[in-house]
Image (cartoon, rainbow, N blue to C red):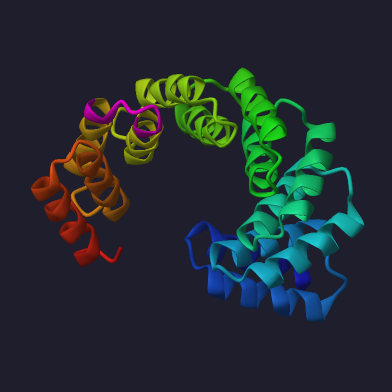
Amino acid sequence: MQEDENAKAEALYARGNYDEAVSAWEKAERIGPPSFDLWYKKGIALRKLGRYDEAAVALEKALLLDSNDADAWRAHALVCSQMDRNAEAAASSAKALVLDPYNARTWIVRGFALHRLGQYEKAVESYARAIECNPLGADGRRAWNNRGAALDNLHRHEEAIESYEEALLIDPFDIYAWNNKGVALGVLARHEEAISCFLKAIRIEPEYATAWKNLGVAYQSLHLDHEAEEAFIRAKKLGL
């Protein structure tokens, strides 16, 4: 029966067996008309497997059955973002926010899509809304960090640095926030401070190639050519 296959699929999904869960949901589809839950959960499993095209299709079928589900719109936005279909991601996240305007993660997904579309002011606004909804935890850290990146693109580097510092208050081991803060400081010719940031990122993650490369640039700006060369060599060995 379809109910049995659905139950089997959900049990497999709960155990992290996403491939087998998808197969069980596909069997359930052949037995009877698929429900919203089937398409939605199958879409989530496909996303976890990195099968984004199939995930988008499954979520679109779910939304045809229930267009008032904020979670499904957010999931569709996230899948579209992962495929670099940013206009669709922005549109789907906007629909999710009409239904649930207080979800920080949805504001982050929307901000990321707008950022990639070059709409930096709107991205900053979205990240600010995410922070209003949840200024702490993983969502807060991500929103503060992403807000900083959007501000950097607007050449508002002092504000960007403040944003990265808020992210680091939440998680002082966030290598991306340390690196991004360093880059912003470098743009402002505060190279010694930038070096300190890159070194902190590298101490946390010694194989963070981007931080090694940026460290080299900062050393170079101070005419510390030997140190710069060593940093560039390390970055190259790590793939940059």
Say left or right for 15 vs 153: left
Say left or right for 118 vs 151: right
For residue 159, above or below residue 126: above
Say left or right for 72 vs 61: left
In the foreground, 126 or 22:
126
In the foreground, 22 or 110:
110
Instruction: Mark yes or no: residue 5 visible.
Output: no
Instruction: Mark yes or no: residue 233 visible.
Output: yes
Residue 188 sits inside the magenta stretch: yes
Name of the residue lying farthest toward the front: 223
Number of marks in picture? 0
Residue 61: x and y in percent read 84, 64
User: In the rendered image, which quarter is residue 27 located in?
Assistant: bottom right
For residue 212, above or below residue 4: above
For residue 206, above or below residue 157: below
User: In the rendered image, which quarter is residue 60 located in?
Assistant: bottom right
Q: Quadrant of the C terminus?
A: bottom left
Residue 116: x and y in percent read 64, 49
Residue 181: x and y in percent read 37, 31
Q: Which residues are magenta?
A: 186-192
Residue 222: x and y in percent read 20, 36
